[in-house]
Amino acid sequence: MTLHTLHPFRDRALIDGRWVSATGQGSAVYDPATGEIIASVPDLGREEAQLAIAAAERALVGWRARPAGERADILMRWYALMQDHRDALAQILTAEQGKPLAEAAGEILYAASFLRWYAEEARRVDGEIIPAPKASQRILVWHEPVGVTAAITPWNFPAAMITRKVGPALAAGCTMILKPAPETPLTALALAALAEEAGVPAGVFNVVTGDAAAIGGALMDSPVVRKVSFTGSTPVGRMLFAQAAPTLKRLSLELGGNAPFIVFDDADLDAAVDGAMLGKFRNAGQTCVCVNRFLVQDSVHDRFVEMLRERIAKLVVGPGTDPDTTIGPLINEKAVIKVEDHVADAVRRGGRLVAGGKRGEGLFYPPTLIADVPADAAIARDETFGPLAGVIRFTDEAEAIRLANDTEFGLAAYAYTRDIGRAMRVAGALEYGMVGLNEAAISTEVAPFGGIKASGQGREGSRHGIAEYLELKYVMMGGL
Ligand code: ADP
């Protein structure tokens, strides 16, 4: 059975409840495992983005007025549909993104979990009554939806980066225009089809594919769009920050990271290696919370490297559709070149190549391990976004903290130690939005995900995630 007969690709954009076809050639979507074109989506621009903004503005009136329970029911149906269609969605995701099917299916469930969580949160958006200065007054605090919002999302989690934005937006009573990544629009459009089936009204959730700068420009210029949530690179995040100034939009920015993974000499090394494998090689190293550099204490450095080498040897590189595959292709040529550059840089500076180190066919790059990497290597500054594990030595806790914080980024950090005092000291000293202590799987819909410094601002997930889509209104009632 071909993918097409199993679940036809949605290859049209969604504006105001209408599925819009490509007029010209459209924008090609590639399978990174084969290089083949698998679909083409409409190559839309400024004009269509403006139509979507107008539709979202019209739809806002009815959507925000609905009782929260009704919005919650619709989100819960969307959640259930994602679960029902998990395997078909995973196939679409793997076809355009490359990650192994099992990981793709895991992402679909993770993505759906945000719809359930925010369906639950929708009915908990309450207000406050504050004791007033005078007996004749009452002070009320209301939460209101921000209004029309927009999301710009990346290719590395084609489903989850969307639901963690649209879930809280719709729960809060906002409407949304989504511009998905050009590499992975098919998952976004499949999710939109399920949203429609779940009962999300026309105009409440719009998906505009095509020219990033033109669509992004229209979203950023518009005074109607009150908030933009972006996940992607730091340079584009900085540009959006500047573009938001004229209309003073609210922004959530989830940008790059450079996660340190610190292994102290008192760590449970088996647990640390388990965590290292998960934290480094998930999605072939292409996640913003992926470990970018291992900081390992002198006395356990060689043992840790050897244990990691043994585990890396068991990874299987191949197309995501092959059930044995644990490392799929990278997303594009630029991504492969970046890994090659980081490997060459680490080796040139004296790092010892222990595994991998040479690109494979097409966009495949084998898991690579480099020991004794000096602390000034490129991996210490720049996000690799690929399957390269570079190990840097340190001597004591103070040095580990200094090296870990010596970056402009501040998204996720990890530390392995069995000393509870050290664990708390280190977690406190790390300048990061998220810290995994003896744990590498930190992403969950119930916790606030986000970074500081050049990793951005705002949080997604948990009850804090919905606050990003709510404004406070304070009402003073006098003359009582
Ligand atoms: P990556 O390099 O990982 O693709 P980007 O930050 O370039 O990361 O892309 C993340 C998202 O930002 C994608 O949806 C992309 O199309 C979008 N994007 C890129 N450039 C712009 C732009 N000038 N304006 C608005 N969105 C943009």
Image (spheres, helix red, strand yellow):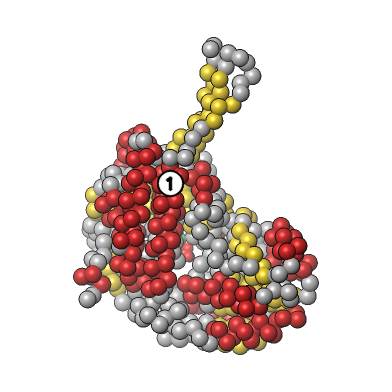
Residue 403 sits above or below residue 269 on the image: above
The residue drawn where x is 43% and y is 61% is: 110
The residue drawn where x is 37% and y is 40% is: 69
Mark 1 within 8 Å of ligand 1, using the beta carbon: no
Residue 12 position in % (x across, y down): 26, 58
Label 1 secondary element: helix
The residue drawn where x is 41% and y is 55% is: 163
Choose between 83 and 218: the one closer to the eye.
83
Residue 161 position in % (x across, y down): 44, 58
The residue drawn where x is 75% and y is 81% is: 299
- Ligand 1's quadrant is bottom left
Residue bearing mark 1:
120
Residue 357 position in % (x across, y down): 55, 86
Choose between 34 and 280: the one closer to the eye.
280
Counting every numbered tag in the picture gives 1
Callout 1, which amino acid? Glu
Report if residue 386 is visible in the image: no
State left or right for residue 469 relative to residue 423.
Answer: left
Choose between 126 and 315: the one closer to the eye.
126
Report if residue 254 is visible in the image: yes
As drawn, which residue projects farthest toward the top? 479
Q: The N terminus is located in which quarter?
A: bottom left
